[in-house]
Amino acid sequence: MTEETPSKIPAFIREAVAEDLKNGRFNYVRTRLPPEPNGYLHIGHVKAFLIDYFTAQEFGGELYLRFDDTNPSKEETEFVDAIEDDASWLGIKWAKVTFASDYFDLLYDWAVRLVQMGFAYVDDQTQEEMSASRGTLPKGTKWSETESALKPGVDSPYRNRSVEENLDLLERMKNGEFAEGSRVLRAKIDMAHPNILLRDPVMYRIMNAHHHRTGDKWHIYPMYDWSHGQNDSMEGVTHSLCSNEYIIHRPLYEWFLQKLEAFPSRQIEFSRLNLTYAMMSKRKVRKLVEEGIVRGWDDPRLTTLRGLRRRGVTPEAIINFVTSTGETKNDSYVEMAQLEAIIRDDLNKRAARRMAVLRPLKLVIDNYPDDMVEEMDAVNNPEDPSAGTRKVPFSKVVYIEQDDFRETPPPKYFRLFPGNEVRLRYGYLVRCTHVVKDDAGNVTEVHCTYDPATKGGDAPDGRKVKSTIHWVSAAHAMKAEVRLYEQLFTVERPDDGDLDSIINPNSLEALTDCYLEPALKNASLSDRIQFERTGYFCLDLDSTPEKPIFNRTVTLKDSWAKEQKKGQVE
């Protein structure tokens, strides 16, 4: 790291890791990504992934990708493959892929050791009885308030079973002799501890479920707090970097490692990334998918990585967003507008410019030769001179946007209306002479005349126009569907709301009669395109050569809409 290449990780993490290396606590750095394979990654996961990755990278260490597959009832190989693919798409590289299930045998052996040492026991209480004996936090209690909010717990009647009886019961639990929910293995710590997580936490529960990797071998599965820290230690992970909700878990993380005298992995927490108008609850996203509110985990209205990818967001934009949000002591929300601004900035530099008419209105140039076709020189990207130019066909009949014409214009409207002159981008100046309407009085055609002396430049007599509009030649246009996406939720914090009441009914508008310039016939899924004056778009996975479909990634800066609210449209 130099002044020219600033650190991409929070300063306090960088300082802590550097100190651990300096004082000899560790002589190398190894971090890990521990996703649970029960869904797809969302943008909230990306911060944790990047901090783990960049920390290992900055200190010359390595990163493990370890799947926390300890809950077989919710896990699928599909999610494993998707998580690997998404992380790789971000540019994250890892030294090794592992699974919590790789260590099930060793983890069980370590549990037996704790039983033998008198630090774990089998409990026959029901879940309700255990919860009552541990104490319950009042609703809305913050983790920092737990010590003052809790009364001492009550010991389980099974807490003082003999080591021999506990070992026998644990073995029989493992072998599937007992019904689900009938017994658990608990750590024996302190039922009066002010941290509720240290009140004899559950280590194993009975689950007669088929595991996607170990099959039907196991009838007990470890709880996250038991497997997480021990897996870190087993893999020689030096720094377990996780979000703030795990601060309260850290004493338990350290207690297990100290009692087992295992490799002392260190947990360090950072603030969680929360985004307005984005759902971070994987459980609720799963519900959206299962109830058909969205089309799948990759629906472009979601902030899953799959959804963002399908919407046309680049990995560079996501990384720039995460690293630009900075670090705060407490969890906070970042505005969706900040993400969109970074996406615009990224796409502005890379997106090829093309003309597309989404809501077409026919414009006929009466004095243009019927059979003549010209090719206009159009710039591919004004931000990148090396992108060059392209040829765009021009003919007597073109399509323009309905919003670019008003029969009766509002004040300060400078686009096309009867008697007004505008420029057709890269083409000629045209003046509206009259319109054609249908029986209902709707304008179906706009008729104009053009000035042949104004091709691609100013009028010889020096007259100026105040507006330039885009167009597509009707004879050469490619018809396509364009999907316009808005926020899926009507509230800033959808994780806190009832799904039925917070869904935006206008989050998707599919326009099926759009006309695009012919250069887009060769568009690929990897292309990023700016429809001039409209927004940034990409080809959708559903596209076929016969039916191309484009997704809007993000709008352009909507200055026109802001002015319209003031009654000052142009």
Image (spheres, grey):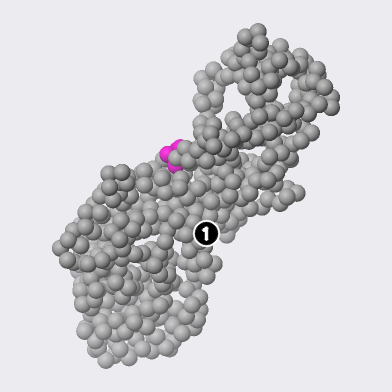
Work out whether residue 456 or residue 122 is closer to the camera in this orientation and state it.
456
Residue 204 lies left or right of residue 215; in this view the side is left
Q: What is the chief secondary structure element of the magenta stretch?
A: helix
- Residue 232 among magenta residues: no
In the image, residue 74 above or below residue 322: below
Eyeballing the image, is 407 above or below 240?
A: above
Tell me the residue at 50%/75% (across/down). Answer: 212
In the foreground, 367 or 148: 367
> Can residue 205 be seen here?
no
At x 84%, y 24%, the residue is: 370
Q: Is residue 286 left or right of residue 238?
A: right
Give the crowd class for mark 1: few <14, some 14-19, many >=20 residues within 10 Å: some
Q: Residue at x 53, y 34 (%)?
A: 385
Residue at image mark 1: 286
Amino acid at dot 1: Arg
At x 15% / y 63%, what residue is drawn? 23
Q: Which residues are magenta?
A: 337-341
Q: Nearer the viewer, residue 292 or 93?
A: 93
Question: Can you tell which quarter of the image residue 442 is in?
Answer: top right
Instruction: Give 407 or 457, whichever is nearer the viewer.
Output: 457
Residue 218, percent from left and from top? 44, 83
From the top left corner, tell me how far across and down residue 39 is, in percent. 49, 62
